[in-house]
Amino acid sequence: MQVTGLRHMVATPRVRATQRSALTMLVAAGVINYIDRATLAVANPLIRHDLHLSVADMGYLLSAFLWAYAFAQLPTGAMVDRIGPRKLLTLGLSLWSLAQVLAGLVQSFGQFFGARILLGIGEAPQFPTGARVARDWFNARDRGLAMGIFNCASSLGTAIGVPLLTYLMLSFGWRAMFVIMGVAGLVVACWWFVRYRDPSAVALTPQENAYRVQGDPPGHRAKVTFGEWRSLFRFRTTWGMILGYFGCIYLTWIYSAWLPAYLEMQRHMSVKFTGIAASIPFVWGVLGSVLGGHFADWLLRHGFSPMNSRKVPAGVALLGTAACTAAAAYVESNVLAIIFISASLFLVYATSTCAWALSSVGAPTNCTASIGAMQNFGGYLGGALAPTITGLIVQTTGSFVLALDVGAVIGVISAVSYLFIVRDPVTAADMQALGALPAC
């Protein structure tokens, strides 16, 4: 699947308007997605007091979201490919926003646990939808930047979530905080459903369709089948993406779950200063997301194959993340520690963008969300394990050094997976050879 040497087709004004609108709505949904993930962490002390919960109970509530989100990825990706981004993201946004409203009304641990599971299931379509939208509306040479803009919502939401949620909680109470965020999500769900259209619902011109599919592998069909979805697990590229993203999200969640505590416990920073210091690295994560996607597109335009333009920067950036994480563990200066952590998040979000861009060239068009969700499933197995493993190591050793070293080693292994296990894209012909598709 090469695009090198082909004339780069230009999007029509109508397609460009659709691209801008879709990315704006996806970023808005993604920011709310990540702010909603932070609500429990921000309100942790008040929730424990009001509902008489233990620290262990709060750990179960945090993990309930992560495990539900991870396992919901597998069917959700196929559903996005089969039903379409418009309906699936509307459903997902509505479900996770309803879960937030319910979380503001709970009276017991069991009710809260159920709301967190609903949150994880509801948020599952968000990133597979973004990958499919990039595949549906952008030329292969433009998808990296599109994914970078969309993916920056995760770091942006994390950066602004804590101060925004703290303000809402102190002004209106933790229950109202959950309800307000739930209502905001429902508004965005309505916006998406009214505004966005899948390509199949638009009377596109031949020029517009040619722009969208230039460089894509031939032979794809409109909707994914169960046989196609299942056959993706039989290719080394799929498993390379799953293993690669495991380390990317493992490292991301070390910082997402433990950065404030690390700065307080390991670096002895004040609580007031920690709130500022902990947000700085995630601002760099926003830049990493956008620039990582732009760099992947630049490589494609300068002779790299679609696969190599995504997997190589993903692997190299993940190696850099591992190196900076290890360095942050050992430097004595707090300023240097913040610099290395900022570099880590810059690079790990660049990895994340390239990984999602990889899903848009790694499989036939009708399997884009499916393979992206499989990759995300592997990532959030790492995401679910990272807070627990880090906490156990810190509790046992009294230090974050070994926990960061473990994260760095996992990052190196995952980087090797991207660089050497991920190879050629999965094609319709490959699936046909396995019997997933009927012979033409």
Image (tube, rainbow, N blue to C red):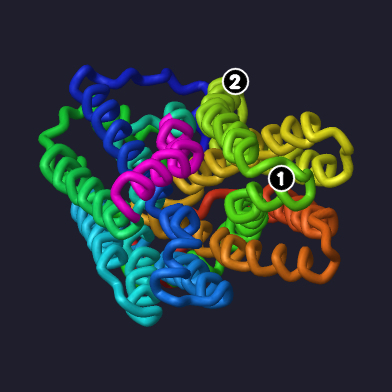
User: What is the x, y in percent for residue 421?
Assistant: 69, 55
In the picture, the disc for residue 56 is none
Q: Which residue is mark 1?
A: 263
Disc 2 to disc 1, C-alpha distance = 42 Å
- Ranked by sequence position, the earlier of labels 2 and 1 is 1
In the image: residue 235, left or right of residue 370: right
* Amino acid on which disc 1 is placed: Leu
Location of residue 268 with respect to 19 vertically, above or below: below
Q: Secondary structure at mark 1?
A: helix
Residue sitting at 34 percent across and 49 percent down? 129
User: How many numbered marks are there?
Assistant: 2
Please tell me which residue lies in front, 2 or 66: 66
- Horizontal and vertical percent position of residue 416: 75, 51
The magenta region covers 146-173
**Viewer-closest of 185 and 101:** 101
Kindly indicate the quadrant of the structure image that contains residue 102. bottom left
Residue 172: x %, y % from top left: 29, 49
Task: Examine the image and state in which quarter residue 405 appears.
Answer: bottom right
Mark 2 neighbour class, 10 Å CA radius: few under 14, some 14 to 19, many 20 or more: few
Picture coordinates of residue 200, whole percent (x, y): 17, 45
**Secondary structure mostly taken by the magenta-highlighted segment of the chain:** helix
